[in-house]
Amino acid sequence: MASFFHAYCPEGVNSKYRLIVFDDKKEAFIPLTEFYHDQFNRISESSVIAYLNTLEPFFYWLKYKSYYKARKVSWDDDPEAVKEAVRQYLIEQMNCKIRGRDGHEGVYLTSKSSKTVQLYLSAIKGFYKTMIRLKKYTQANPLIDLEYKDSVSEQPGERGNRPRMPKAAGTEEPLSFRKQTDSYFKIINEEWVPEIIGDWDLPYRIYQAGDTQGWRLRDEVITRFMFETGARISEILELTVGDYRKRSDIHELAATNKGSFKRRIKFIRISPETLKLLIKYVNSERRHFASTQVKFNDLPDGEPLFLSTRGTPYTYSAFYSNWSTITKNAGIKLNPHKARHWFVTSMLRGIYEQSETAAQIEDKKKQLIEYMKWRDPETLSVYEHYYDEQKFRDLHEKLQESYMQREKEYFKSAKKRSVVKSPEILMAFELKSSDEKQDWLNEFFEGMEP
């Protein structure tokens, strides 16, 4: 199906845009293009690309299938028309249910709802914030709850007849994040469910596919980082030589965390084998594309560890393209972020298998929470809930195997008896189931003078 899509500026073409979004007619769609470049300077590229991937289908749908008062809706339409278009998209394309509430509308997820509903709502609200900031949309943000500030200010504080103290004061109970947002569309019944990946050989299948495909040493090192550290791919791609030197342990690197604004507030730990591969990459393959030919020990602290073939910092989109080729060769459809889920699941399994007492389990769980830098310690409990379910499934399967074996033995022995006494039923129970570059592309970028 035709849709909007984006493409990076081809090598050798001089343009003010590093990326352009095109519509289904292969014509440049400047609003989304400007949105990308504005957000690129504010958040990680992987996040911007994720936003584009969820907005491009919406703008295609908006162009052909949106209606408001018997007319099509354009992206720069009045706020009510945009709201109606977003509402229709949530219902028709994302299988959500919408219920009106005071000053906003509640979004109820169903069993058929897309997993990207929250991402879409964040992206579309961010798009209009950008358009307003760039003065390309002159009306009020249609995705903002205009009554939000008033509703928050009206809530009483702990001190009677006085305004609430700021959150930083720590003297009053914080307002619920989920209930108090400035979004016009608010997800009401959202429940985050982690990806529990029980294929313990998953990393090795990826490594083998990479070797077969003849991947670059750079991508092998990055992939090993993902599975060994549990770090987000954006955090790995942002690593510098100085991040390695900041830690006293030779197998650790300082790293950013989501929402840390580039501050190195945590560390990640790699295996001795991956450390050898990292140094080998920096001293060999990386030098072919770097502007400086010095080896690892002489590189400046600010030098990024991973470079593209152009000698620029390696981006998420470039890595993802190579990652997709490798995983496809392995016969696996896998988002890079799932390596993080695999890491947590594996660590949790190791904690239970290698601990002798409940106290040891709790102590190791606290260490894992601190390592992952989760803002909410309850995040691990969600993993545990689903991990416990998996452990029950394993137990249940073994129990059923035992039942089947006993059944076979019973009927085998029954044939030897002339009278078979009916077994007494003690209990019944029920379990609930839980590139080729194209000429038109070069022409577009060449027309975008710097």
Image (tube, rainbow, N blue to C red):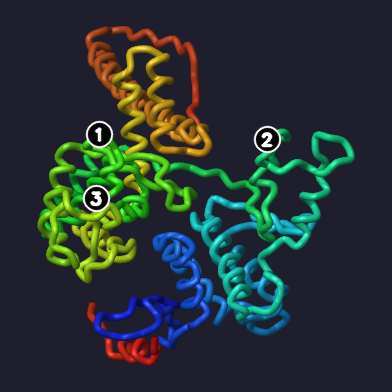
Residue 92 seen anywhere in this rendered image of the structure: no
**Which residue carries the number 2 mark?**
170
| Quadrant occupied by the C terminus | bottom left
Q: How far apart are labels 1 and 2 at the CA level? A: 36 Å
**Which residue carries the number 3 mark?**
223
The mark that comes first in sequence, 1 or 2, is: 2
Amino acid type assigned to the residue bearing label 3 in the image: Thr
Q: Which residue is at the front of the view, 446 or 438?
A: 446
Residue 91: mark: none
**Which residue carries the number 1 mark?**
249
Looking at the image, residue 59 sits to the left or right of residue 333; the answer is right
Q: Element type at marker 3? A: helix
Nearer the observer: mark 1 or 3; the answer is: 1
Looking at the image, residue 84 sits to the left or right of residue 30; the answer is right
Within 10 angstroms of label 3, few (less than 14), some, or many (20 or more) residues?
many
Residue drawn at (60%, 58%) of the image: 96
